Amino acid sequence: MIDANGERRDGFIPASYDGASGGASARDVARLLRSLAGHADAPQAVSASDERPLEVAALDANPPRLEAATPIEGAFAARAVPGAPIAGFRAFLDGIQVSRVAGRWPDGLPIVHGTVAAVVRRRNDGELATWQGAPRLLRGVFLPFSLTGAARLAAFEHAGIRLIDTLDGDVATGPRHPSELLAVARTAVQRQREALELALAEAWIADGDGPLYVDGGIASSGTASRADGAIGVVKSHRTLYAGGDSLGVVLTLAEGARTTGFEIRSPRRTGVASWYLRLRAAEGMDPFFGLVRVEVARDTFATARADEVSRWVLAERAPVSLPDKRWSTMAYGIRNCEEYLRAVTGRE
Amino acid sequence: MSVLGRIVATERRPNTPHEFHFWTAIDSPVGIGTIVRVEGANAVNGAMPRTYGVVTEGFSYTDLETPLHDVLGHDGSPSNAVAAPTRRTEVRLYSAAVLRHVPEEPLQPVGSGTVHLASDEDVNIALRMDGYLKAGESTGIPVGMYRAGATASPVFLDADFLLGPEAAHLNISGVSGLATKTSAVEWLLASIFAHFPERKGKVAAVCFNVKGPDLCFLDQPATKLDDADRALYAAMGVPAEPFQHVEYFAPYTARGYALNTLRSNEALSHNVRPLSWGLREVLQYAEVLLNKDDIDAKADALIDFIKERVVDQPFTDAVLSGEHRVASFGELEAWFRDLLRGMEAKNAEQWRTHHVATIRKVRNRLTNISTRCRGLVTDDGSVSDLPFGAFRDRGVYVVDVANLEDDAQDLIFARIVSQLREHLEKRTLGVEHVVVFVDELNKYAPSDGPDTYVRAMLLDIAERGRYLGLVLFAAQQFRSQVHRRVVGNCGTALFGRMDPDELATPGYATLSPSTRTKLSTLEKGQLMVRHPHFAQPVFVRFPRPAVLSGREGVERFPQAEEPTLEAAITRSLRALEPTVTLDWVKETIALADEDEALRARNRTLQARPEDVKSYFRAQLKRRVGGERVPLPPRPALKATPADDPYGF
């Protein structure tokens, strides 16, 4: 058994993380809503089984897009990663989020309960264990404060339920479509998750224990995006940093090959160096099968560094993370993080 | 103590009052048979519950959904597995059977909590040994050492439930040749002798050696005890020594010269005694040797008449030529011969209501016994028996029946057990408790087949023996083939390595598949123990017996060659009188025939007189020395007559 400090301690098992104590659960919120029934302006509780999580609802209106990127390693091209894959990551970071409509007020304003959690799973001698002994967890009710009204908010505060403003302090002008409010709530939940992941990543980097495999990009983290200890691996490609001929280069990458590096810049995010890497052969498959995009700090980028990191990422193809549907691009360590978080947050 | 695991209960696999589940780290020292303690997380009636259990089943699985996923993940090549930098998440999940709840009431399902390896004290509580291991009142008999991780705890049986009166009897099952049955009994007898409380009375053992030299060297020290064995003896407080007082009994061979035993080496003859019975002893158990076809009501009546009116008393009848005094098979045969001759002379078909055909039949069957059991049954009525009435405390009496016919074995078993029972009932045996060890129980008390006298006797011991102090330790390879009432009445059961086919029989259905697997792969010296105090069977390890094994014994003490008549008598008498020499015996029996010499030897051995030589000599027929008479002078072949006319 590996303890929180990475030490092997035979027969010692740290106390399991008690997910139920990490803030207000969906059941707590449902209980409150039931207690409010009969009052004027009482919200209508919604059964958890009646509502799908917002994460699986079709709320995202942003269409997939192509975006230009600046080459930093010569002309955009494919190149084989030299050398054999080798384990280089010390730990894996991932987070999860689950949000559901817990109830609605008579005016259609949705009451969204959200759970977000993040964890670093540190690897020692092939075994993964939770870094610092526990994950970061947040549970609460996500509401647009300026549309909800003080009286309604007070009922939640009085019950000790944590409230998060989906508008992030903005004042809404006029009523909004309930579906729009749900999308806003989901984005707010996502922001909370990213904040937890960010905090964990920065803590890890401060600890300086070795390369960290981050699920997703690192550009949103000021510290992580500038440090060589965090490597982001992006599995989804709704935004493709390729255009023209370079799109074909990306989509036809061979197994074990990468593109040359390019820089991604964004007004609200730190610039990072990135490249595409094909983890598994995609002949006859979807062009995104086994395709990931790797992000590292811009200042640390060099061809040798990109090859080394690519070898690290390629090494994480085994063990395969089946039965997860994203297995072609998901490292086993990331799946392990998700399984761990699902176990400790329980069924919401 | 560190936490070993955590209780888990799911809807599919809930915990119950008699079973619970827990997971552990991959490298935990838990295995099938491990005893664990559960520290409950929620108080019941103000007390934190503790539960003790023994692991009965184990599961291991990973987060894989199907094996195919792993095949795909390694591109179909097992050797690719070494390249994986992360080991797949793997679970060790165990099921345990509850041994004890503390407090006992209310009896509830095992709740959530932490699981710990049982300590010495936990093992005592879990197996309820705390009830009979109280200082000064202990009735504990060590049966073996329970081991798990760093824990090594002696496991004790309760003497009141092993030797009576609460429960009694022990049954041992196991395949042959793996040091299970005989070794376990030898170890357990040593343990009983070392720990049986004096206040409970004296205890002895009668062991029937039914095959090979298994029990022939109980008084000789073992040669293969290693440090681990000695440590086990020390930990359980049993001296690693052979038995101090052992006596061997065996019938003679058919020729009657030597005893029919593998313990025939002269160096070990000092405590080997003949086992021989005369007519009176055998007639008491005639039904053992006579089957139901033999003993109809008419024959039974005649046998009873002979037992009550003929044997050991003067008997006269008008039909008979004279008075008979029947004390041996030879004299019985003479009586029958005279009776039948008398009836023929009078042309009578009936004699005292007995038909001549019945008389002939009974004569045939009874006189045939001495032929069928030759060596055990003597024609001359001499008796050499176990020392009923003078049994020694902690004494072992081995009766070697290994080379005898089934009939003789049955007769020996029936008579000795009956004698033990009678003496125990009268409290005249010399000890209050006797352990009777019988191997190959499936032969003597089979679950099917005819209802024999021996089986009925074993059933009687099993069902009623504990009140008398008559305790049956029985062993067999296949428990399923032994009469259910015999094994059912054994309070304690030991299981060594078992045959998988035997484990597939219904009697083992209560054991988990893993427990059955463990039973079929047990190492030498390991046992599974069932005892009335133990809610579940537990696994223990016992040391090698501190006595010489049969196999080593016959190598170290080779069997003596069949001796000559003179040498056999010399060897027998020398055990009583060391000055007896072969020349003396030759000279003494020079004029005696073989039967007479053997009879004299048997009587001397039975009487064990002070002056062995005189007594032996006195048993031989007195013979008057011949007087030499001078021959008359021979006439010459040729003599000249005085009146020879020819004048030669």
Image (cartoon, coloured by chain):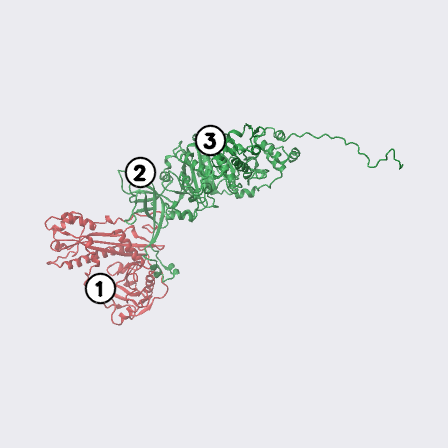
Residue kind at label 2, given as amino acid type: Glu
User: Which is in the foreground here, disc 3 or disc 1?
Assistant: 3
Q: Is residue A236 visible?
A: yes
Q: Nearer the viewer, residue A113 or B640?
A: B640
Q: Gap between marks 3 and 1, in whole Å?
A: 105 Å
Residue that sits furthest to the bottom in the current view: A245
Q: Quadrant of the C terminus of chain B?
A: top right
Question: Which residue is identified by label 2?
Answer: B104
- B410 versus A91 height, above or below: above
Q: Quadrant of the N terminus of chain B?
A: top left
Q: Which residue is mark 1?
A: A266
Q: Colour of chain B?
A: green
Give yes or no for contact between labels 2 and 3 (Cβ–Cβ under 8 Å).
no
10 Å crowding of disc 1: few (<14), some (14-19), many (20+) = few
SS at mark 1 in the image = strand
Q: Is residue B61 above or below residue A294?
A: above
Which is in the foreground here, disc 2 or disc 3? 3
- Mark 2 to mark 3 CA distance (whole Å): 43 Å
**Could you say where residue B589 lies in the image, as x and y percent from the top left?**
65, 34
Mark 1 is on which residue type?
Ser
Which residue in the structure is indicated by mark 3? Answer: B422
Query: Please, which chain is the residue tagged with disc 2 on?
Result: B
Near mark 2 (Cα within 10 A), the count class, few <14, some 14-19 or many ≥20, is few
Quarter of the figure with residue A75: bottom left
Instruction: Tell me, by letter, which chain the rendering colours red.
Output: A
Q: Nearer the viewer, residue B235 or B335?
A: B335
